[in-house]
Image (spheres, rainbow, N blue to C red):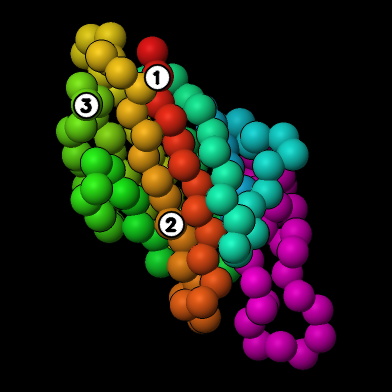
Amino acid sequence: GAAVAAALALAGCGGGDVAYPVGFDLGVYVAGQPLAGVTISPGATQSIAIYAGQSIELDASQPVDWTLWVGGSAVTGSATVYYGGLSITQTTVSASRIAVDTAANYALPAPVTITFVATSSYDSSLVATVNVTIGN
């Protein structure tokens, strides 16, 4: 729960007298449960598979600008998009956390891949990417 989220948020924070951490880490939660052993740092790309109907949350250890790429189009802020037979609803939870709910009324004709890009609000050269493939 909250203790795990706090521990993940604190992991990777730099020490010293720096006003903001130099880098950030992303924690990933599927259906409310943290993915064990998955921590994504700037410069890294992580691929994850979930099923249609599952939710996914991404939580950075500092404020980031989130961009969700669906079918070549960028989605920012809270929005719902429909692509490949899938409803994808993104909700901005905080400056560092987003939640995405997926739903399909029918079996997907093919897996759908969406991409999350987290860019540090403090240093735009720090970018982490998460590819999520959604299947039946």
Q: Name the residue carrying label 2.
A: 117
Element at label 1: strand
Q: Residues within 10 Å of mark 2 (few under 14, many from 20)?
A: some
Numbered mark located on residue 84 in the image: 3
Identity of the residue furthest to the top in this view? 107
Seen in the picture, residue 89 relative to 23 is either above or below; the reply is above
Identity of the residue drawn at 28% across and 9% down: 107
Residue 20 in the image, given as x and y percentages of width and height: 63, 82
User: For this view, does 101 lie left or right of residue 85?
Assistant: right
Q: Name the residue carrying label 1.
A: 135
- Alpha carbon distance from label 3 to label 2: 20 Å
Q: Which residues are magenta?
A: 1-25
Seen in the picture, residue 125 relative to 116 is either above or below; the reply is below
Indicate the amino acid at tag 2.
Val
- Alpha carbon distance from label 3 to label 1: 11 Å
Q: Quadrant of the N terminus?
A: top right
Residue 64 seen in the figure: no
Indicate the amino acid at tag 1.
Gly
- Alpha carbon distance from label 2 to label 1: 21 Å
